[in-house]
Every structure is written in structure tokens, then in C-alpha cells.
Image (tube, rainbow, N blue to C red):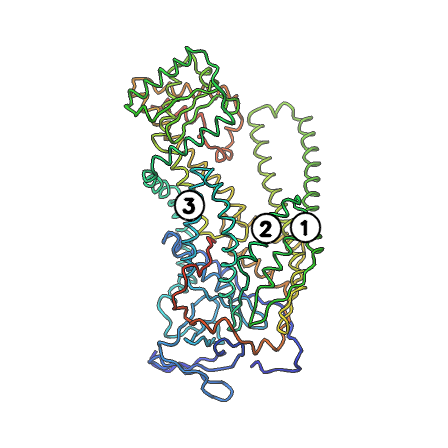
Amino acid sequence: MENNITSPAQPRVGKVAFSGQAGEFFGIWIVNLLLSIVTLGIYSAWAKVRTNQYFYGHTRIDHQPFRYLASPLQILKGRIIAVIIFALFFALSSLSPQAALLLALPFMLLSPWLIVQSMKFNMRMTSYRNVRFAFHGNYLGALKYFVLLPLLSVFTLYLAMPWALKKIDQYLCSNISFGGEKLQVNTDTSSYYIAALVAFAAIMGLAIVIGIVAAIIGGIAAATAGDSIDSTAGRGAVALMITVVMFALYFVGFALSGAIYQSMIRNHLFERTELPGVAKFKSEMQVIPYAWLILSNLLAIIVTLGLAYPWTKIRKAAYLASVTTVAVYPAIDSLVDEVQQDSNAFGEEAAGLFDVDVSLA
Amino acid sequence: MHNTTFVQGQFQFAGSSTLHAAEAELSPQGMLLIRSSDNKTLLAQAGTADYRFGSAVPGLAVELRLRDGAVFVPSDNRYRWPRLSKRSALAERLESHKLSIVAALLLSPLLLWWIIVDLMPMLASAAVPLVPDSVKQQMGRQTFYSLQKTTLEPTELPAEQQAMVRYHWQMALNQLSLEQRQYQLHLFKSDFFGANAFALPDGTVVITDQLVSLLQDQPDAILAVLLHEIGHVEGQHSVRLIAQSLGATLVIGIVFGNPEGVADLLLGSGSVLLQNAFSRDMEREADQFAIAKLTALGKSPQAFADAMAALLASHGDDGEQNSALLKYLSTHPDTRERIEQATAN
């Protein structure tokens, strides 16, 4: 079936295929939602696993799907820990702001550990062709990249932020391995600065246009309808309209800047990342289609009071797959999983208490 | 079930990415044999204790995992094993059956609504007595301290007006047989709050000079305002509001997860709306407390309506109150509604 080795270094090149269907996923989502509500959130762990299984299983590279391996009980455990931490922090900060301030420092020191733990767990639970991914980051590395660098960039008035973001991406990606081979990342700092600048310029441009339009409309309204604005109903209507317009603009700005930054960075990151001898990647995201996707997804969710959520999730996954190309080298057919050797495939052995992803979502 | 099952698919040894076209053979007793499709050599064999089925998810093949980590995946995505566990099969049937989907579509919003509107406040009320008094004291002291530092200035009211307010305060406390040691009245001048009054969880009640001046000709209205604030303390509203908001945030967060940043955006505004709704409910509760106690003290509930009317007049006739949408952005019920409530009694 797979023994079609033509010449040793010829890659099989193809788009990532996504076969999830909005209608099908809607059923999964809404039924799991009801079960989660009825069980007061407990079933949400099963819901998360089934949702991930659906999306992983419907994402194929070179005709082979991904697999999500986590068991619901592991997810449940992580959620219970997350709920306790969140509730304590929420209650404390509401009851006594001073105590919350004191807690901020330990929490800041704890967060790199949580990030590493989460990455390790999620990578280990992702498998492709029966080979698991792995994450090799450690606490000190995460502390440096997720706490110290961002703190440092605050002191440079955020001028160093794109550089810090590049370092963070590089740290995350280059510590991922698959079949004993680490990802090689060779990103440029300049690309991050350009992406951040373009996103920032787009926001500023939007703000200027809005400012001009608002001034013109305000001027016209004041000149023509000076009397009617004084009436209470008129003022209420204007206040309401301003609120709605502000919300809408906030969404547009959010979608546009997000789309610009994400598509530029993803394209660059994929271009400069490879799994040596095994796979190369290419991402061809375009700003306008992606911005429209984000914006229309948001709109659909709002208009349908959340019911369009499954459709938006499928649509986004399908789009991201359609702009991603992977070149797979024949070495992929004979990889060996190093992670799996030391663990029972059924996950029956007692894992440590914190062998979980501490996360609410 | 009674026949041996043959399934075509692909097989991978433990931890190996090499794919083998294979055929699985499952006997009625559950004995599993996996043979290569090419040359029929035996690739794996296992008893019922040494293999498991993966989850049945709509649209995806159900894999068969061996204890050592080897995997067999049927080529047909729709194929379902005869020995699949009941629970796994049930989840998939529910997720793809029209009836259960429609039921979930109808029931989910109703139940979610009930949990947030009825269950959460109930649980919060039950949880509040568990919060030790020392915590409430601490909360009150800290808030009071920071307010004093930022927005409150010493009162500038003439002595007789202060005495008048304190007289009504004492009257309320005595009549309601409340512990005086717990309740503390403070008068402050505050440009930030304007004509206003508020209560802290430890029993500290603050009324501003501006509000006293506004109601100086209607002493019963001052009494009504003080009773409203006592209602907040008696109902332990500060702690309850925290408990309810926490509960609602957790429920929404867990049930919906975080749909890629969408939640941050929507939940942020959503939880503010919810918190405001909770706050409006508590204002109504404090209103009802004040009205009931006014009657108990032999006063007319009209005094409360007078206080509200005076406040409404002093704020000017805001157009805000007219908008149905802006109602949800407010922490207090519509003032006219509160007046009607008082006069209806």
C-alpha cells in the first residue's frame, strides 16, 4: 500500500485535507453541550475529547489522519485543578484586592510551569501514523520566554515585543519533536516587526477613517438636528447607536489586525520550519479572506446566539487546511516512536497528579 | 455476532509509522487475528483482554488498539465493530440521531437559563453563610479604607442635619433589633458619588452630604434609603454577588470552552451583563426589604418612592432610562419601576 518508493528523496507534496462537516459536527456539539449541562460540567471532559477526536481524525496529511489520544478522565482532572485555582483566585481578588496583588507574583512564577505542562500533555496526546509528538521545553526556558522577555519588552515601551514574540514562537516550535526528530525553526526577527507594524498601521488607519467620519456625521447632526437631539428619546437613540457602532468597529479592528498578524506570521513560520528529512511545510494565508472569515464567523455566532459556533469552527479548520501544504519525504514511512516505549498504550498506569493539562477550555 | 468478522484496513506495529495493508479477523468469542493482505502472514493476535476499540465518532473509522501499542484501522469509515462497547455506540447514536439533536437544541438553552437564573443564585445564597465573618469584616475595612483615601471627604453638613440622620439611623436599628455593634453609619461629602448611599459587607453604611441635602425636607425618605442599605447588608449581597458571578463565569467557561478567542470577546461583555442582572435583582431585594421595614416602623412605603423620585429629579431626566437595550447595561433597576413598586404597596 505504501511501498511506492520511487526515488529516495522525492517528497509527496499535497494540501492538508479536512473532511469535517458542519451538519455532522453540529449534532456532536449540541448533544455534548446538553450532556455537559445536565452533568453540571463533568461531561464537558468527554465532550472535549470527542470534539478533538473529530477534528484530529478529519485532518489528513498524505491520506493519513491525526489522532487525539487523551482520555476524558485526564481532561477532567486537569479541569478540576483549573477550576479550584480559578475559583480561589477569583474569590480572593474579589474579597481582598491586596491579597490578590500578593498572589500575582507566585502566579507569575507558576504560569511557565503550567505552559510547559500543557504543551507536553497536548503534544504527547497527538499522534500521526501511530507516532506521538513530544515537547522538550522545561521550566527555566518557559520562564525566560514567557515571563522575562515580555517583562523586558514592557520596559522598552513594547518596542521589543515583536522580537519577544519571535523568540516565543521559536521556543515553542523548536522544542517539538516527532519520531525522535526535532522541528528546525529559522525565523527572521524582521518578519515579526513587519507583521506587527502592518497590523498596527491597519488599526491606526481604521481609527483615523472612523475619526473623520464621526466628525463629519457629528457636524451634520449638530447643524441640522440641533433641537431633536435635546429630546430624551433622541439622546437615547444616539447613545444606543454609538454603543452599537463602537462594538462593531471593535470587532472589525479585532478581526483585521488579528488576520494581518496571524496570516503573515503563520506563512513565515511554516516557510522557515521543517522536520529534517521528514517533512516541509508551506502556508499561503491571505489577509482579506482570513479577516472576512474571522469577522463573518463572529457575526454568525452573534446573530444566531451561538448556534453557528459548530459551523464557524468547521469553516475555520477547513480554511486553514486549504492554505497549508505539506511535503512528506519517504522517511515518514519508517519512523519509530520513542515516546511510546515507556508507557502502556491503554494509559492504565497511574499517572502523576499533575500529568494533565490544567486548563478550563 | 455469531459469525467470524473479517475487516479490511491498515495495521501499524507499536510505535511504528510503517503502514501494512491488513485484514482483521474477529471470532465470535472475541479472538483477534490480524493478517497481512499481501501474503497472509500473521501480524498480530490477541485475546479480548489485550485489545480495545477507540471511540466511535461520526464520520470516522473506529480504530482497534492492541495493548502493546499496535493499531488497526478499518478502511471503511462507516464500519462499526460488532463488539463495540454500548457506551461508545450510544454516544455516537445520540450525536447523529435527529431526535436527540432537536431535543438537545431545545433543552440546552432552557437548562442553561435555569442554572444561571435560578440554581446559581440559590447555591450562592447557600454558600454565603459559609464565608466567615472575619472575611466580611476584612472586605468592608479594605474597601472603606480605599474609598476614604480616594473619593470621600469629611462631611460639611450642619450639626442638626447630622443629628437628624443619626436619629433615624438609631430608630431603624432599635426597631429592627439589629446588632448596633455591627452597623456603623458614616456621613461623607463626595463629589464622585454625588447624591448616593452605599453599604459594605461588614455593616458600614455611608450616606453622602449631597443625598442628605436632597432629602432634608423628607426625613422618612432618608430612613427609607438607610433601610435599603441595611437590606443589602442583611442579605449579604456583596458576598452573594461574588459567588454568583464566579459560578456563572465557571459554568459558561466550562460548557462553552474558549472558541478561539471568540469567547474572550463575547464572554467579557456577557459576564458584565450577567453581573449587572444579578446586581439589579439584589437592588430589588433591598428595595423590598426597605418597603417592608418602613411598614413595620409605621411609616408609609411612599417614603421610599419619594426618595427615588427626588433622586430621579436630581439626576435630570436621562433619556437613558427610556432605552430598552440600555436597561441591561445598568446595575440598578429602572427608577420609575422602583417607584411604582413602592407605591403599589
Tell me the quarter of the picture where residue A185 sits. bottom right
Q: Nearer the viewer, mark 3 or mark 2?
A: 2
Q: Amino acid at mark 3?
A: Leu
- Residue ranking furthest to the front: A140
Label 3 crowding class (10 Å Cα cut-off): few <14, some 14-19, many 20+?
A: some
Residue B118 in picture, x, y percent from top left: 36, 42
Instruction: Provide the residue designation for mark 1.
Output: A196
Q: CA distance from mark 2 to mark 1?
A: 20 Å
Query: Residue B153 appears at what percent x and percent y?
Result: 50, 21
Residue type at tag 2: Leu
- Residue B229 appears in the picture as rendered: yes
Q: Chain of mark 3?
A: A
Q: Which residue is mark 3?
A: A88
- Provide residue B225's location: percent of width, then percent of height: 40, 22
Q: Which mark is residue B8?
A: none
Q: Mark 3 to mark 1: distance in Å?
A: 36 Å
Residue B82, picture quadrant = bottom left
- Chain for numbered disc 2: A
Q: Which residue is mark 2?
A: A148
Q: Residue at x 46, y 32 (%)?
A: B331
Closer to the chain start, of discs 3 and 1, is 3
Q: Residue at the spot x=37%, y=19% of the render?
A: B223
In the image, residue A320 sits, relative to residue B41, either above or below, namely: above
First in sequence, mark 2 or 1: give its number: 2
- Image marks 3 and 2: residues in contact by CB distance under 8 Å: no
Q: Nearer the viewer, mark 2 or mark 1?
A: 2
